[in-house]
Amino acid sequence: MQLFWLSVGFGLVTASVLAISAVGLSLQFGITNYINFAYGDFMALGAFVTYVLNNEVLHWNIWVALVAGSLAIGVLAVILNRLILSPFARRFSKSFYVLIVTFGLSLVLLNIEYSIWGADVRFFQMPIDRALHIGPLLLTKYQLVVMAIAIVLMLGVHAMLKTTRLGKSMRAMSDNTTLAMTSGIDTKRITTITWFLSGTLAGLAGAVLGITEGNLTPASGELFLFVIFAAVIVGGVGSIYGAMAGAVLIGLATEISAAFINPAYKLDTAFVILILTLLVRPAGLFARPGKA
Amino acid sequence: MSNIWYYVFTLVFFLFDYFILAMGLNIQYGETGILNFAYIGFVAVGSYVTGALALPSSVGTGQHYILGLGLPFPVNLILGGLASCGLAVVVALISLRRLRTDYLAMVLISLSLVLYDICNNFVPLFNGADGLYNVPEPFAGVLKLTTNSFIPFFAAVTGVIAALLWWVMSRITRSPQGRTFRAIRDDEVVAAALGKDVFRNQLKSMLIGSFYAGVGGGLIIQFSGSFNPTAWLPGETFVVFAVLIVGGVGNNVGMLVGSLVVETLLIHLPAFLPAIPGHPGLIEYFDSVLIGILLMAMLWFRPQGIVPERVRRALSLGAPANLVAGRGEAPGSAPGRPVPVEIATADAQGEK
């Protein structure tokens, strides 16, 4: 039983990281209507910028470095969208082209990361601390902070989408871009802001992934991307709330199965759930019309 | 034989092998429009099955694998191709029916990683992370070749197989079946409205492509004698896509050109460069960055590839000359992409 609760604790932490990253991916997918296969590399890059600020140059506190690293990836996402992705998306009506371009971008970013930082496993500079007992769960302070960040961000995204003008415009664009444009929404500006948010969330997710796993390599983002895909598809592509629900489901399922079956097959558990979802409810648990 | 020839024939082998792989992906993506991001998984299945069939029983070899029947060369290769087809049936039944492009791409790329994960961790299947090795050379008992004479010999065998598969593929793409594939690629709804069973045809295309993938993979393990999970990380699919896009989607000659440019010149030639001291792997990283950039540049400046798809005409119906002039830039189509002008009625009558 103790093993079970221990894995639930890990599951909630994984779910937090997944929720942050899945929401970032879904926001961008809702607006631009194509999947960004370079998202995992955005995450790894966020982790490495955080790592550089935390370890190499300035020895900043991990949380300060984290914020700076995330914002840097937000800016990078905007630049990459302006220079590469949005021209391709405008020019070719079929989504094949832009998907292959994001796949190519992923290859470029991953190998740039490898050439700068090599394939070695690296670690953040964090003071070691004792695990705390919270009810039946056993969690470290860092894990608690990561969970708090995830909860605050989810509430923030919810409030932004429901109450602000920006959120309303984003939802309108996600429903129908042409209609949003004719009602006077500056779609280009919204797209830029969305890429910034998506990139920032990716960078943040990558850094907190590094914190919770305790280490980082250039490939860690790409491996995690598949778990994000599972969470996003199970929740329903393009649905923000679906992404959150999918994150919790996949996060708990992978960690609990890791405790009782074999940690090596964590990824496969996520994939089995993904396949079952596709067979039973192909559009995901919280399907949105027109997006599936 | 000097080392130079050893390198040259290794390059020739990979040229032909990736030609086969690219043809397989082309029938799926280029002709039918299925964005198969799990392609390298099909290659791997073909490779493992071919290798495991050629190896003797695993008892006492220090390796763990299934099968181990010690079958002779062309038989195991064909069975490897068919095993890959078996995977295609499963994948198509689960994912092809109702998923739109993005979903399909996500599911397939995840599948590719999961296959990798299983083969890497589940040792009894194909020897886990070590992969299969000591796979017997084809015709070892008959010809008694040395390592040096085996390489040019097998490059030639691969060339013959590639030529044969090319002949078959060009028959398929020119047939009414090929036209049906392209109709589905260009517009599924229109193809369905003309009475074409979209799923059935996509399944056919997946099967043909997977067989090519399996054979291409089988040749790799027969050539090098070993195959392990690092050879087929999901990113490898991208290399085959690069061959396809650089060479020209929808054109079998383009595949050979693409294979020459991407696989031979960009991937295998730099591998022979001496490593930069103190920076192991740096050349490969730069190489991958270069391939990524080349691919994006190709898509932007020459999306039809080096050898573009031929504009096909229905001559029997006397298609007006202006319809095929200007390489078929039909209004409303993506710029730069040649749209094959096809008369739908001719297709509908052509295939029964």
Image (tube, coloured by chain):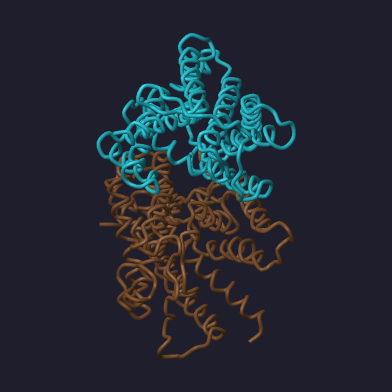
Q: Which chain is cyan?
A: A
Q: Where does the image place residue B308, in percent across and percent down from the top left?
A: 56, 56
Q: Image quarter for residue B314? A: bottom left
What residue lies at 55% left-to-right and 69% top-to-bottom? B15
User: Along the horizontal axis of the image, is B5 left or right of B192?
Assistant: right
What residue lies at 54% left-to-right and 66% top-to-bottom? B256
User: In the image shown, does A281 or A144 lie closer to the viewer?
Assistant: A144
User: In the image shown, does A108 or A200 lie closer to the viewer?
Assistant: A200
User: Along the horizontal axis of the image, is B83 left or right of A41?
Assistant: left
The reply to whether residue A33 is visible in this rendering is yes
Q: Where does the image place residue A62, in percent across and percent down from the top left?
A: 63, 28
Q: Which chain is brown?
A: B
The reply to whether residue B196 is visible in this rendering is no
* B21 lies above or below B347: below
Q: Residue extending furthest front? A: A130
User: In the image shown, does A247 or A280 lie closer to the viewer?
Assistant: A247
Q: How many marks?
A: 0
Q: Where does the image place residue A142, in percent across and percent down from the top left?
A: 52, 27
Q: Where does the image place residue A259, in percent across and percent down from the top left?
A: 35, 41
* B21 lies above or below B36: below
* A144 lies above or below B236: above
User: Along the horizontal axis of the image, is B151 left or right of B177?
Assistant: right
User: Along the horizontal axis of the image, is B293 left or right of B256?
Assistant: right
Can you say which quadrant of the picture contains the C terminus of chain B? bottom left
Can you say which quadrant of the picture contains the N terminus of chain B? bottom right
